[in-house]
Amino acid sequence: MTSTGRWAPWNLGAFHRRSKVRSLLHGDAHPGNMYIEQDGAPGFFDAQVIQGPWHYDVTKYIVCSLDTADRPRWEHALLAHYLKRLRHYRIEPPSFEEALDAYRREITYSLCAFVINETAFQPEAINTVYTARASAAALDHGLKALMR
């Protein structure tokens, strides 16, 4: 909230609290925290399990996982698939338009997280790749104009 009591679109904390669909989150979903079982089943380690808005982990994982050339071709389909899975588990998802808006705004967190991430947590090369991917996503989605 701003001093006038209005919600500020750039305030991620307020944005997260407004999310209607809540879920358990890994808290740091990116390929560096993923492993594959012998049977091919994926999993995450380094979990910092928290409750929060569905788009927190989804956005960070999509933005960090997909190369900048591939993300524009896949992100809508992946987002639609996630919403379909929510419905499968009897969770009423937001509309695709609402979900896309949440996804676009959440790119802010992915960008900020890796710009300031210390090399004690990720090698500089990984921070650089994730920052570049998040930067490209921010530009592609007009994040600067969206967050005004």
Image (cartoon, rainbow, N blue to C red):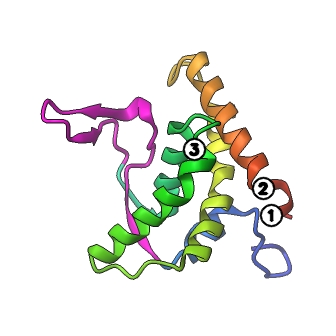
Q: Is residue 112 visible?
A: no
Q: Label 3 near label 1: C-beta < 8 Å?
A: no
Amino acid type, callout 2: Leu
Q: Nearer the viewer, residue 28 or 140?
A: 140
How far apart are the two marked residues, 1 and 2, measured between alpha carbons? 5 Å
How far apart are the two marked residues, 1 and 3, measured between alpha carbons? 17 Å
Q: Nearer the viewer, residue 143 or 115?
A: 143
Look at the image and say whether residue 44 sits in the magenta stretch. yes
Q: Nearer the viewer, residue 48 or 69?
A: 69
* In this picture, residue 9 sits left or right of residue 55: right
Q: Is residue 46 above or below residue 92?
A: above
Q: Label 2 near label 1: C-beta < 8 Å?
A: yes
Amino acid type, callout 3: Val
Picture quarter containing residue 82?
A: bottom left
Q: Residue at x 62, y 40 (%)?
A: 113
Label 3 belongs to which residue? 63
- Looking at the rendered image, the quarter that the C terminus falls into is bottom right
Residue 143, given in percent of the width and then of the height, sits at 78, 55
How far apart are the two marked residues, 3 and 2, measured between alpha carbons? 14 Å
Look at the image and say whether residue 24 sits in the magenta stretch. yes
Residue extent of the magenta highlight: 21-48
Label 2 belongs to which residue? 143
Q: Residue at x 55, y 74 (%)?
A: 96
**Element on which disc 1 rests:** helix
**Mark positioned earlier in the residue sequence (1 or 3):** 3
Label 1 belongs to which residue? 146
Q: Is residue 57 above or below residue 8?
A: above
Residue 1, given in percent of the width and then of the height, sits at 74, 74
Q: Residue at x 75, y 77 (%)?
A: 7
